[in-house]
Amino acid sequence: MMMDCITLFGSGSLGSGSLGSGSSGSGSDSQYALKAARVFTPEGILENAFVHISHGRIDSVSDNLKAGYALVDLGNHKLMPGLIDMHIHGQSGADTMDATEEALAKIAGDLPKTGVVGFLGTTVTAPWPKILAALANVKSTMGKNLTADVVSGAEILGTYVEGPFFTPKNKGAHPEQFFLAPSQERIADLLEVAGDTLKVVALAPETEGAVAATRQLVAHGVRVAMGHSDATWEQVEACVEAGATIGVHLYNGMSGLHHREPGCVGAMLANDAVIAEMIADGVHVHPAVLKLSWKCKGTDRSALITDCMCAGGLPDGVYQLGELPVTVKNGVARTDCGSLAGSTLSLNKAIRNMTGLAGVPELDAVKMASEVPARILGVGHRMGSIAPGMEASLTVMDDDFNVLLTLVKGQPIFSAWSETN
Ligand SMILES: [Zn+2]
């Protein structure tokens, strides 16, 4: 079985030898079938199914091998859609705010180790010109990726602007001296610099001009997320009415639920127009509350995110999140005043926690990290699920959700596969 993989995916070991453009030329890897004990499709988990792949896309999913496809048997493992992290700041020492192509390449290159095939470069509150520089860098880097025929990592799907339109009371790791109101001029700045690579802008619904800013962004196809906020139920409802659709890491950095003042949490749980982001690391939100949120919002309105900062994939130590030093201890990132400062979570672990700690069925947990974010970001027609016509951006995990293999558009770009698998 392993020989099939080696032959199919290039010389040497599976994955590492096939990154370059040189290995994709042989005819054998343009058409093949992946067989796995459990295949996660939108309709359910199929047992011992075959996913047929041709020229980087899924042709069909069936219970037998079609003629003309080389077989890659993934044994007893789970084959699922590649994961999509719509809210992630950095990885492996690199941060979106570094505003360099190298930083984005590092993040994109290392995320497939966690099963991620697509992500939004997420900014953090900083002096306004620095935020604009980060957006400009994502845009120019994406432009280059589009023309390159070499797959080098997870796909950059655009930018998520987190800050500076926030409220001091729930600032989290955002330095309040750089907070600004979401004026029409500033929103126009974002749109001008980022163009259609601007995917999500977060704001606190109670900031001056928030409703008008929401309308302005939505009119340009940008999703509005609400967070780092002390808003009342009415203020959240007004933004939702104007088109806001995302709750920024539900519970963290927002007014809580009181039975006479539902606040941000109550409004977001109750309003079906809102999709809730959740940081399922077992630290940001208690597992019982993760379960409760899922029961309220359902799978289709729940998106697992990591909110990972640059220490993701690295040991404990002192790091930087935008303008602030952050100490990571036992994997938990905090500012000097003790506030949680992003996370070091990975999406495969978030799925593990949603199933293991919060008791959510695994198909639902996987959808919350693939199909749901793909739909939110407008790429659900080409990625985020295993179905005919979709790009073959996939990941393979073992029973404990350790990532064994990740493919982007049919090419293996990460492998921890060994003969013992
Ligand atoms: Zn945040």
Image (cartoon, rainbow, N blue to C red):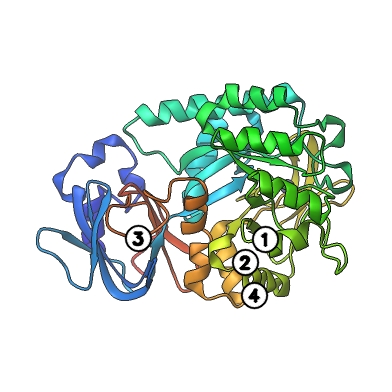
Residue at the extreme left of the image, as rendered? 67
How many neighbours does mark 2 have within 10 angstroms: few (below 14), some (14-19), or many (20 or more)?
Answer: many
Q: Position of residue 78 (x, y in %)?
A: 39, 69
Which residue type does callout 2 highlight? Lys
Q: Position of residue 209 (x, y in %)?
A: 78, 34
Callout 1: SS: loop
- As drawn, is 68 to the left or to the right of 102? left
Of marks 1 and 3, the one in the foreground: 1
Who is closer to the viewer here, 128 or 12?
128
Question: Does residue 60 appear in this view?
Answer: yes
Can you tell which mark lies on residue 130?
A: none
Q: Are marks 3 and 4 in contact (CB under 8 Å)?
A: no
Which residue type does callout 1 highlight? Asn
Q: CA distance from mark 1 to mark 4?
A: 26 Å
Tell which circle, 2 or 1, labels the residue nearer the N-terminal end: 1
Q: Position of residue 77 (x, y in %)?
A: 38, 71
Of marks 3 and 2, the one in the foreground: 2
Who is closer to the viewer here, 143 or 32?
143
Can you tell which mark lies on residue 386?
A: 3
- As drawn, is 76 to the left or to the right of 110? left
Can you tell which mark lies on residue 297?
A: 2
Of marks 2 and 1, the one in the foreground: 1
Q: CA distance from mark 3 to mark 2?
A: 23 Å
Tell which circle, 3 or 2, labels the residue nearer the N-terminal end: 2
How many neighbours does mark 3 have within 10 angstroms: few (below 14), some (14-19), or many (20 or more)?
Answer: many
Callout 3: SS: loop
